[in-house]
Image: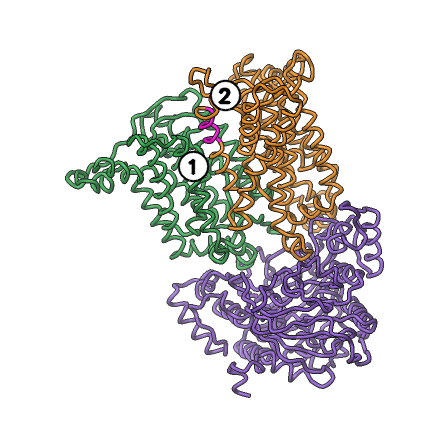
Chain colours: A orange, B purple, C green
Amino acid sequence: MKPFQLVPRTQQSLAAQLLVPVVSIILTLVAGSVMFMLLGKSPPAAFYAFFIEPLTTRYGIGEVLLKMGPLLLIAQGLAIGFRAQVWNIGAEGQLLLGAIVSGAIALQFETSDSAWLLPSMVVGGTLAGAAWAAIAAWLRTSFNANEILVTFMLSSVALQLLYYLVSGPLRDPMGMSFPQSAMFGDAALFEPLVSGTRVNTSLYLALAVTIVAWIFVQRSIPGYKLLVSGLAPQAARYAGFSENRAVWLGLLIGGAAAGMAGVGEVAGPLGLLQRNISPGYGFAAIIVAFLGGLHPIGILFAAFFMALIYVGGDMSLVSVGLPNASTTIFQGMLLVFYLACYLFVNYRLQRRSKKQLISASSGREGSTQ
Amino acid sequence: MTELLKLDGISKIYPSVVANDNIDLSIEKGEIHAILGENGAGKSTLMKLIYGVSQPDRGTIYWRGKAVQVRNPAHARALGIGMVFQHFSLFESMTVVQNISLAVPGSLSDLSKAIIKAAEGFGLPVSPDTLVNSLSVGERQRVEIIRCILQNPKLLIMDEPTSVLPPQGVEMLFDTLRKLAADGCSILYISHKMDEIRSLCDRATVLRDGKLVGTVKPSEETSQSLAKLMIGREIPHASHEAATEDGEVKLRIEQVNHTPKDPFGTPLNSVSLQVRAGEIVGIAGVSGNGQNELMRIISGETLLKPPSNGQITLCGQNTGRLAPMQRRRLGFSFVPEERLGRGAVPDLNLGYNSLLTGLENGLSSMGFIRFGKMKAMADECIAKNDVRCGGNSARASSLSGGNLQKFIVGREMALTPEVLVLSQPTWGVDVGAAAAIREALIKLRDAGVAILLVSEELEELFEVTDRIHVIFNGHLSDSLPTRGTNAEQIGHWMTGSFVPSTPAAAAS
Amino acid sequence: MIDSLTFLLAGTLAAATPLIFAAMGELVVEKSGVLNLSIEGLMATGAATGFVVATVTGSAVAGFTAAAFASMLLSFVFAALTLGFLANQVAAGLAVGILGLGTSVLIGKQYEGATIKPIANIDLGFLSDLPIIGKTLFGQDPMVYVGIASVVLITWVLNRTKLGLIIRAVGESPKAANSIGYPVILVRFCAIAFGGAMAGIGGAHLTLSYTPLWAEGLVAGRGWIVVALVVFGTWKAPRIALGAYLFGAVSLLELFVQGQGFAIPSQLMSAMPYIITIIILAIISRDARIIKLNHPASLGVPYTSGE
């Protein structure tokens, strides 16, 4: 007889919820060391480069915070949809649309120094991201088309749209047919937050969205309705919470957040439109959302850690010569371990009661005494 | 006679409950043996142990004189134990013969012949090449029984088989079972219905709270004495005055036609009924005859497309297109048949589950949850309805079926509805709690609430309702005054005899 | 004209083959009640492994075998998550998909941008020399025919054999399948492993025959199109294959249009497979009854044997 059995918990364990991301990070690090060894790198050196070095310099910390912004923003939006089982995996495309539209606004008013330029870019980009996601919402609610596939396909379409625009209509006429736009004017850029770093005021946007997300998810009736739609669609229908509304809301919120993140990129570190806008933030944010337990506060920490992996990946490429694929592998492993550990939020391992074990092996027990 | 199966001191302990405590049982060859007990008495657990679905924690099973460990259902079948489940284990998208081939070796054409032969021999008409999803519940049961018979079982376990049959179907089933027993197959018959056990079974083993109460000869007992053994006391009975007949019509359904989106659903055909304030109207019928579709239309989970498809009027207002939330605002309240996943969110605690339908009853303000009120409401519902659970922070999925049902019924009653619709409200609830629910219904009725009750238990309908409709294959009969009809009449209607064009109607 | 028609028809079959392999695998997985969204990563891993092994050993057979094996190994991670740890299947698919993409880059690191001599087309003498149909039907590489054979085989297994009945039974109602004695977890595990191997072979066909080179991101969303194909085909193998050929044709259109010198932005043509996927997906999914009648009833729902 197996000495342990899985027993469903009567209440979700808060301790387990807190522990699961920590344990999955530790497991990722362990598996990471194995990978480093297989690649012929010394694990301590690789670890130092990956996880410590970025935090030893002001520039490094700035980079981590810079990358944390979009991850945080997108993950907050996605998590709200995921709680409703609305699977938006195309945040990457929604981000690009945000970048494209805000970029177009910036280029249209290249010479403007109005204080309204940046806010209107933020609004325009956010709406564009939401609109791109709205296509998926419309196809799901009117045609029953699976949103996982549609959002993914749409992000591939968005990338081609960006390629087309930067090599055609939005290309810098002075740029010698380089596939990129002209530089934005100063009024179209976020202010730097700390000198000597690239982190800028768009981080405030991400933090503000985090607070709003917390209130929405934890306190509000619409947030509760979305949660019920995700956990038990039949119960939601019984209660009268519209499934279509959940799909629309889940996708629009995710799209808006991703669109806003796109503005942060082009009006932040980039300052122009080009072919490479996001190093896969839209996909990494999916992992951030899960690693944060789909909880706004958890996501805050998860976004920081994921940003660290990004910066660590870049830095260790230079200093230790780790392949840049290790960043992707780390991301994959994190989510794999997280999903495995998550079992223990809902179940606990129980030792079979002594009585049960004794009765099962009473013969052996008797002979040893 | 020779002993086929013997259980010696069998116990099964689950983390929260001792489901079987030191059970002894012996079954002779060719015997029809009843296991009698209330919901939650441990009948199903015991059957799972015999059928190898789970293993006992203590005790020994002897099969034809030898101690065995039944490792899994396949092993049980190899030994010669077959089981017909309460909720069938058939595959809807496959034909009858394909289903049977999954359990019985042989080519499809050989099996088809065997099916037809067994069907004739035991009075179980069924055609091998029909898709299961087009069969009625009763026909599905026949398929399950044939599937067992073709494996030449020495012991056949039947788990509450009559819960899906109209009264006439029950007699047919009993004939089949008697034939089987005469052929030497023992039958283990699980039920909580005393009359059936008295007319069918040679011996009955009675369980209560997981413990063995005794083994008796049912033919020498009365239904009352069996019930007392099973429950440990007299059955509480609700008795009440006839309803006032001049109440205002609170719920009116007129000429509703509806084809469900679900390809396996039952279309509704010109259904009409009305419920007045201060009366309880019942709907009898074997499950799967359109109850579910009708309930969804009344609750607003499915919306009608007027005007051609009929009309629903709730408290004087046309509601065919109103969402469930809006109907609730009019004073409508509904207890669905499925508790977990529909009536309650399994992964949320009872507090959040009281918010499910109560969010406009003071549990929220300005779009925000009022946590204090929410928990208070859950606590009150728990205390008032004797819900055994770990308090308002316990997950709905951690409650037993009966306790969760009490919580949901209590929650819907707490909304002080003007129209209350309930589907199978006492399914799986122990006798005491079921009686409490019925009593509460009558109290609400006397306070002027209009109540519609869908139930498969005729006893329940006769106990509390004032008028009874019968539903069959999407058709709803006219109503009969409960005090002016009897189980025979309703049972006859349950086979469809009230529908003008069915064979049963032509025969009568 | 004949040249371009031959190019289109013959190319369509070749371009569709990676999709067909992966889609036949995914079909079996979904029929058993599991939604595996990691196909993109599985194909990438197969593509890289196949390329590297074929380059090192010089044997295409070794390449395909290694690819099947590597992707199957990776699919074990998915199986462990969904069957063992009861993880949400969508999330688990994403996780393993990302892991697979990363792994593929790591495996192919030394070979980024390298090319390989594609596996030889068969030559049936005069048959292969016939105009248009010769090259299309009798002059493809062997794996194209293996792909077609796999469609026939899968159709037969799922509809005509006991094994197929068991897979469908597990996918429709794991509880019922368990109660009549079938090992649900084992059946699903085998289905996932098979799906993994097939995705690996599909990926390897990309690098060993279709492109034939290795580059990061070379799978380019085909894994997702495969998942969509299974929906298009309403879980029926021949229809899925038909869908795959359609997509083969669409993806060739880009090259064709460029070749003809039409003034259509190349980006629009690159986006075309995705746009068409979305449109067909919407059209097919629109009739909820058809989807409901055909899709495995327990698809995506975690199963616990639950004592």
Q: Position of residue B501 (x, y in %)?
A: 51, 81
* Residue, disc 2: A181
Q: Position of residue C34 (x, y in %)?
A: 51, 47
Q: Which residues are magenta?
A: A159-166
Q: Residue at x 23, y 36 (%)?
A: C122
Q: Is residue B232 at least partly visible in the picture?
A: no
Q: Which residue is outermost to the bottom?
A: B508
Disc nearest the viewer among 1 and 2: 2
Q: Is residue B375 magenta?
A: no
Residue A56 vs residue A14, the one in the foreground = A56
Q: Residue at x 52, y 87 (%)?
A: B507
Q: Quadrant of the C terminus of chain A?
A: top right
Subunit under mark 1: C
The secondary structure making up most of the magenta span is helix
Residue C50 vs residue B184, the one in the foreground = C50
Amino acid residing under circle 2: Ser
| Rendered position, B209 above or below A23 | below
In the image: residue A283, left or right of residue A57 = left
Q: Which residue is outermost to the left?
A: C126
User: Marks 1 and 2, Cα distance to the nearest angstrom?
Assistant: 30 Å
Subunit under mark 2: A
Q: Position of residue C293 (x, y in %)?
A: 48, 58
Q: Residues within 10 Å of mark 1 (few under 14, many from 20)?
A: many
**Marker count (numbered):** 2
* Residue, disc 1: C222
Amino acid residing under circle 1: Arg
The kind of secondary structure element at disc 1 is helix
Q: Residues within 10 Å of mark 2 (few under 14, many from 20)?
A: many
In the image: residue B272, left or right of residue C227 = right
Marker disc for residue A193:
none
